[in-house]
């Protein structure tokens, strides 16, 4: 099985339906594989297990692996690493296998559009990138945390709540009332019989 990046050559795949090839490839992550909050480190290597099975009009590719994503805890902003296992399978059809079928059937316009979206085998190669992006990035956590019990940070001073004294809080005084506050406190002190 020949693979260049995520483009897999089917030249040595038997056309006999049901025949299978398995391979483990090490894929080097290029730039641009990230979500809003997590990133696959460019240049890192991800081992991919591939099983390619010949079907009647193309191939089915099963792939799986574990990806390491890095980012920040959404609560405390500490750096975090998320190990994400993924497994998916994708069907690819030969381009010329579509047309005759389409002419025979009286598909509606919308079904025709669906067919156009089927992943194609072009010049005996298939591109696993869209399927892999889906499997890794679409499944990555949207709000990753360093720990499910992470307390996050104080919204007022930014201190890590796991590191501050118990009962950490801030008195909020409107400056316009600050003078008044002083007046009341001295008043209450004098009132306590000093
Ligand atoms: Zn955290
Ligand atoms: Zn605070």
Image: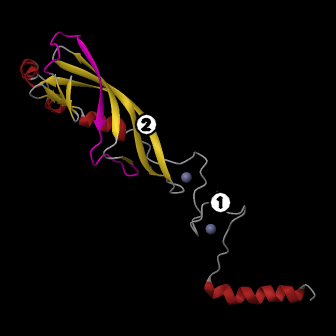
Q: Quadrant of residue 179?
A: bottom right
Asked whether the residues under the numbered discs 1 and 2 touch, taking CB atoms below 8 Å apart as contact, a structural biologist would say: no
Query: Crowdedness of circle 1 by 10 Å Cα count: few (<14), some, many (20+)?
Result: few
Determine the secondary structure under disc 1. loop
**Residue 62 visible within the image:** yes
Query: What range is drawn magenta here?
Result: 11-38
Q: Is residue 78 left or right of residue 88?
A: right
Q: Which percent across, then down, holds residue 111?
A: 17, 28
Tag 2 residue = 84
Q: Residue at point 50% right, 57% down?
A: 77
Determine the secondary structure under disc 2. strand
Residue 30 painted magenta = yes
Toward the right, the furthest residue is: 193
User: Is 133 placed above or below 10 here?
Assistant: below
User: Is 61 placed above or below 153 here?
Assistant: above
Q: Which percent across, then down, holds residue 187?
A: 82, 89
Q: Residue at point 57% right, 46% down?
A: 147
Of the 4 image quadrants, the one containing the N terminus is: top left
Residue 163: which disc?
Answer: 1
């Amino acid at each position: 099985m020949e693979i260049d990046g995520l483009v897999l050559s089917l030249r040595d795949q038997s056309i006999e339906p049901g025949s299978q090839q398995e391979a483990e490839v090490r894929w080097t992550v290029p730039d641009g594989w990230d979500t809003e909050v997590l990133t696959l480190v460019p240049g890192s290597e991800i081992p991919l297990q591939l099983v390619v099975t010949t079907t009647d009009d193309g191939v089915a590719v099963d792939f799986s692996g574990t990806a390491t994503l890095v980012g920040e805890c959404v609560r405390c902003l500490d750096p975090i690493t998320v190990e994400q296992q993924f497994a998916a399978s994708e069907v690819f059809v030969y381009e010329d296998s579509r047309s005759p079928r389409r002419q025979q059937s009286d598909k509606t316009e919308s079904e025709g559009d669906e067919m156009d979206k089927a992943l194609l085998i072009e010049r005996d190669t298939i591109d696993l990138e869209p399927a892999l992006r889906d499997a890794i990035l679409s499944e990555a956590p949207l709000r990753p945390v360093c720990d499910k019990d992470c307390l996050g940070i104080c919204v007022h001073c930014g201190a890590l709540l796991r590191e501050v004294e118990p009962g950490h809080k801030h008195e909020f005084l409107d400056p316009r009332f600050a003078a008044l506050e002083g007046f009341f406190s001295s008043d209450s002190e004098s009132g306590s019989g000093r």
